């Protein structure tokens, strides 16, 4: 019986110790560093804001490696600038083939700041003209931007 009273007493004490000055969540929404990169979907009454968003501007949207052999791994850095008004956050960079791997900066890219996405291509087992798409997903409008690599792959003779 005594333990039941202690249990209820602790429950009442924990409820009464809540911070009532900061709202029901106990956090300050203005202190969230990700708040400006969270985008609210468009509705008929609230169209998409295309002005106050991050914008990714690539120096080049495609790169041609030219003619290579199937034993030659190649790499290219796609340089970009955040030309928008808020911080850019790249959340994913995906490729359309397992032979292509992309690396991208983690964290925020400030307005006017530059960055780069590295794309590696391994032509092993490939032959002929190769066109590969890399899809960059970020807090931009539109959400995805495509960059391309291409090469002509010649088989090596044994």
Image (cartoon, helix red, strand yellow):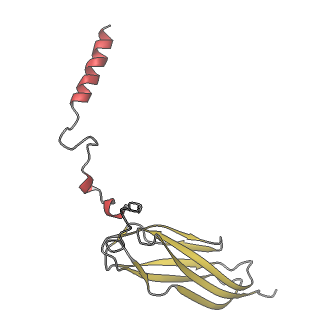
Which residue is farthest top? 1
Q: Residue at image x 30%, y 74%?
A: 85
* Vertical side of 89 occupied by 83: above or below: below
Of 130 and 73, the residue lying toward us: 130
* Vertical side of 16 occupied by 46: above or below: below
* Quadrant location of the C terminus in the rendered image: bottom right
Question: Across the whole image, how many numbered discs are drawn on residues?
Answer: 0
Which residue is farthest left? 21
Q: Residue at image x 46%, y 69%?
A: 143
* Vertical side of 89 occupied by 8: above or below: above
Q: Is residue 147 left or right of residue 70?
A: left
Quadrant of the image occupied by residue 131: bottom right
Q: Is residue 92 left or right of residue 54?
A: right
* Quadrant location of the N terminus in the rendered image: top left
Of 34 and 117, the residue lying toward us: 34
* Vertical side of 38 occupied by 137: above or below: below
Of 55 and 63, the residue lying toward us: 55
Q: Position of residue 157 (x, y in %)?
A: 80, 88
Q: Is residue 4 left or right of residue 157?
A: left
Quadrant of the image occupied by residue 12: top left
Q: Position of residue 28 (x, y in %)?
A: 24, 50
Q: Residue at image x 42%, y 67%?
A: 106
Which residue is farthest bottom? 66
Which residue is farthest front? 44
Q: Position of residue 62 (x, y in %)?
A: 54, 86
Q: Residue at image x 25%, y 29%?
A: 15
């Amino acid at each position: 019986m005594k333990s039941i009273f202690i249990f209820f007493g602790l429950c009442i004490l924990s409820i009464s110790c809540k911070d009532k000055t900061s709202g029901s969540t106990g956090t300050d929404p203005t202190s969230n560093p990700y708040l400006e990169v969270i985008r609210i979907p468009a509705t008929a009454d609230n169209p998409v804001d295309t002005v106050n968003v991050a914008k990714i501007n690539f120096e080049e949207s495609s790169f041609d490696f030219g003619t290579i052999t199937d034993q030659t791994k190649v790499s290219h850095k796609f340089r970009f600038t955040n030309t928008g008004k808020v911080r850019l956050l790249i959340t994913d960079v995906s490729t359309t083939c397992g032979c292509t791997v992309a690396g991208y900066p983690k964290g925020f890219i400030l307005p006017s700041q530059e960055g780069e996405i590295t794309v590696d291509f391994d032509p092993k087992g490939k032959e002929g003209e190769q066109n590969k798409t890399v899809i960059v997903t970020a807090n931009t409008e539109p959400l995805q931007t495509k960059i391309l690599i291409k090469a002509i792959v010649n088989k090596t003779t044994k």
